[in-house]
Amino acid sequence: MSSSMKEEERQLYTSLTDSLKKLTNHAPDLSFREEEDPSERLLHFMSEQIGYWLDHDFEQLLRVIYRIDIDEKHFRSALSSSNPANTLARLVLHRELQKVKTRIAYQKRKNHGDNQLG
């Protein structure tokens, strides 16, 4: 992450990290150093987690995929890819990022509306 990263981007990655921690029931240290690309670190984390689920707990993987509402067609396609863990991790990150962006936008609208009421 470059030192010029905007506060909004920091908030986005922090929220995404929190979401992934809840999703995986893990609390790894996903804090980012200035020189790191947070998207690569999150991709690596999710790829490893999904790889574990593919090998040891496929039912958990299915629960997560269902919970975050990944399309079954995309899920099946990812499973048949050359690197299913990485492909699924990208799908999960994309979906979770959509949700985080929606929450942030909603919060901004809510805060803006609260400020106009007062």
Image (cartoon, grey):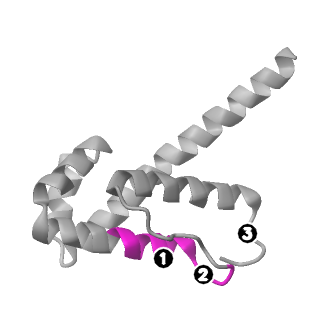
Residue 83: in magenta span: no
Q: What is the three-letter code of the residue carrying label 3?
A: Met
Q: Residue lying furthest front in this view?
A: 27
Q: Residues within 10 Å of mark 2 (few under 14, many from 20)?
A: few
Residue appearing at x 62%, y 42% in the figure: 104
Question: Is residue 108 placed above or below 19 in the rendered structure?
Answer: above
Start and end of the magenta stretch?
34-46
Determine whether, in the image, residue 101 is placed left or right of residue 43: right
**Prevailing secondary structure class for the magenta stretch in the rendered image:** helix
Q: What is the three-letter code of the residue carrying label 1?
A: Glu
Q: Position of residue 36 (x, y in %)?
A: 60, 81
Which residue corresponds to mark 3?
5
Which mark is on residue 40?
1
Residue 38: in magenta span: yes
Looking at the rendered image, the quarter that the N terminus falls into is bottom right
**Real-space Cα distance between discs 2 and 1?**
8 Å
